Image (cartoon, grey):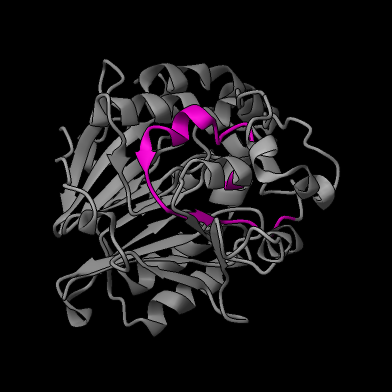
């Protein structure tokens, strides 16, 4: 039986994901998506080494926010000594015109120096990893049977980042080419007392942070199973991409890595209405930005009538509050990792493919 799994490693408020897929356990291929903060790098190296990995098909650095890129600055120099690396996806300064969070662009310049002699955006001929010219999703690559369709960013989101990148990098004394927005949520975890449906209907803003807008977000499809990795992408561009793929219906998806760690500004009702999904992964320890927002989780739960599973890579208070809610076990179920272990999700468990005919992704 084929294997398709996602591991979410501890990355504080950030992301560090490993996708593994193949026809059998002894024939797996692997992809790394982001590497969290600096302390996540050795955890990622150990996880891959313990799994017997020798070749990494693809490393994706979704964007320059510190909680996604910082650990990559330590991971990549060590990884290239241990693993063969097939390709690195990262949209650097040279890709912004090819159409932040503090020192994110500066880290982008440092990463550029580290990967300049590696295969870099090879799947796109060295150009930007982005949606098609008309903004529609684009099948960028097929790696060992895994199809990767890029939804975000589009050309406009990349170009919008240019002034921020240039200003931050020059302020740090570097030469280019060599802000997070949070809407206030109901105070405290007692917001759950308002009720799931009331929270889900709450009107909120939309994320406009330029760095988040450049996020590489994509659908990975293997053996009839689909995973949407939303990075910190803006909800509008994800919604547009799913609408393009599904037409008037909902796109069947087996697992969604919730964009921006469950921010209410990135998890819109309109986005959720474009997908048929019952499993959602939230990657955050909840400390820095108090994610996931109660409104975002309420929207996820309310989006499906027959229940959802919420996967958390930390046993953190904002997540545990939902596990203890009276609605848990009826409208949703919370899943946590074992103590000290990364959260590993077997995508094949109860796939959407068993309930729906899978419409092929458009190239």
Q: Tell me: 237 left or right of 38.
A: left
Q: Residue at x 42, y 33 (%)?
A: 273
Q: Residue at x 77, y 42 (%)?
A: 194
Q: Which residues are magenta?
A: 261-286
Q: Quadrant of residue 242?
A: top left
Residue 162 coordinates in the image, percent (x, y): 52, 20
Does residue 178 appear in the picture of this structure? no
Does residue 221 appear in the picture of this structure? yes
Residue 121 coordinates in the image, percent (x, y): 29, 41
Q: Residue at x 41, y 38 (%)?
A: 216
Q: Quadrant of residue 11?
A: bottom right
Q: Quadrant of residue 282?
A: bottom right
Q: Tell me: 235 left or right of 140.
A: right
Is residue 340 or residue 195 the one in the foreground?
195
Is residue 21 or residue 79 the one in the foreground?
21
Is 135 rendered above or below residue 179? above
Residue 281 coordinates in the image, percent (x, y): 50, 56
Q: Tell me: 281 left or right of 188.
A: left
Q: How many marks?
A: 0
Is residue 227 or residue 176 the one in the foreground?
227
The N terminus - image quarter: bottom left
Q: Tell me: 243 left or right of 24.
A: right
Q: Is residue 352 magenta?
A: no
Residue 343 coordinates in the image, percent (x, y): 50, 71
Is 165 rendered above or below residue 142? above
């Amino acid at each position: 039986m084929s294997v398709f799994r996602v591991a979410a490693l501890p990355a504080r408020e950030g992301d560090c994901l490993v996708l593994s897929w193949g026809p059998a356990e002894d024939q797996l291929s692997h992809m790394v998506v982001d590497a969290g903060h600096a302390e996540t790098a050795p955890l990622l190296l150990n996880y891959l080494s313990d799994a017997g990995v020798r070749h990494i098909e693809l490393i994706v650095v979704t964007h320059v926010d510190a909680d996604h890129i910082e650990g990559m600055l330590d991971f990549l120099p060590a990884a290239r000594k241990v693993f063969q690396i097939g390709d690195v996806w990262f949209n650097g300064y040279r890709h912004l015109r090819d159409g932040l969070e503090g020192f994110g662009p500066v880290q982008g310049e440092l990463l550029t120096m580290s990967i300049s002699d590696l295969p870099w955006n090879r799947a796109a001929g060295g150009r930007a990893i982005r949606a098609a010219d008309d903004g529609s999703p684009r099948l960028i690559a097929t790696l060992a049977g895994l199809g990767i369709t890029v939804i975000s960013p589009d050309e406009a989101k990349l170009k919008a980042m240019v002034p921020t990148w240039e200003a931050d990098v020059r302020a740090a004394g570097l030469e280019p080419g060599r802000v997070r927005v949070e809407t206030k949520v109901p105070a405290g975890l007692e917001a759950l007392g308002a009720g799931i449906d009331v929270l889900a209907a709450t009107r909120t803003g939309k994320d406009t942070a330029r760095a988040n807008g450049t996020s590489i977000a994509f659908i990975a499809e293997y053996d009839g199973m689909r995973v949407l990795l939303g990075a910190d992408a803006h909800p509008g561009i994800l919604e547009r991409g799913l609408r393009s793929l599904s037409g008037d219906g909902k796109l069947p998806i087996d697992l969604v890595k919730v964009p921006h760690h469950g921010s209410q500004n990135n998890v819109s009702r309109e986005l959720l209405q474009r997908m048929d999904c019952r499993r959602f992964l939230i990657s955050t320890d909840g400390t820095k930005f108090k994610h996931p927002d109660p409104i975002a989780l309420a929207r996820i739960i309310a989006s499906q009538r027959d229940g959802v599973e919420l996967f958390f890579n930390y046993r953190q208070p904002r997540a545990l509050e939902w596990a203890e809610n009276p609605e848990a076990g009826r409208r949703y179920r919370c899943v946590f990792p074992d103590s000290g272990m990364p959260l590993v999700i077997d995508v094949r468990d109860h796939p959407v493919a068993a309930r729906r005919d899978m419409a092929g992704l458009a190239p």
